[in-house]
Image (spheres, rainbow, N blue to C red):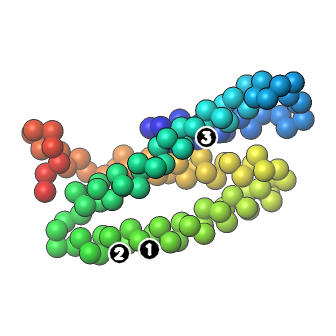
Amino acid sequence: IMMCLAALALIASLGTPDQPAQTLFSRVQDQLFLAGGTLVGIAAGPLQSASRTFLARLAPAEEMAAAFGLYAVSGKAISFTGPLLVAFATWAGGTQRAGLIPIAVLFVIGAAVLLTLPNRRGASGQFSA
């Protein structure tokens, strides 16, 4: 949820690039960009360890190695796909502000995929094995 809020704040910060600022972070767009970046920074650190833990609880025990292998390969693929999408959007939009759009789209796609995953919580509220 925090990543989606951050993505929305980053999109809202696109604003008009030719509106000069009087003081540092005096424009609403600058403040939204700062808030979005802060939310991403707060959420991105714990996200990796949480995603590994979630994968360990979600994957069947007999397919654990395959699940973590796919996790590793997808991480390698996204490490160049994300920057490539940002570069293309920046080139196509003619401004660096347009480069934020693929990031927001990837956050929304990730949230949508996460919502489709099964809930493996037991009656006690704990994840079941």
Q: For residue 67, which quarter of the picture?
A: bottom left
- Name above or below for residue 91 compared with residue 28: below
One can see residue 61 in this view: yes
Residue visible at 61% across and 40% down?
A: 37
Residue visible at 46% across and 49% down?
A: 45
15 on left or right of 37: right
N-term mark: 2 or 3: 3
96 on left or right of 18: left
Cβ atoms under marks 1 and 3 closer than 8 Å: no
Q: Residues under labels 2 and 1: Cα distance?
A: 6 Å
Query: Which residue bears the numbered disc 3?
Result: 37
One can see residue 4 in this view: no
Front-most of residues 59 and 115? 59
Residue 69's disc number: 2
SS label for mark 2: helix
Cβ atoms under marks 2 and 1 closer than 8 Å: yes
Q: Position of residue 112 (x, y in %)?
A: 44, 48
Q: Position of residue 108 (x, y in %)?
A: 51, 46
Query: Which residue bears the numbered disc 1?
Result: 73
Query: Disc 3 marks which amino acid?
Result: Gly
Residue visible at 47% across and 37% down?
A: 2
Query: Disc 2 marks which amino acid?
Result: Gly
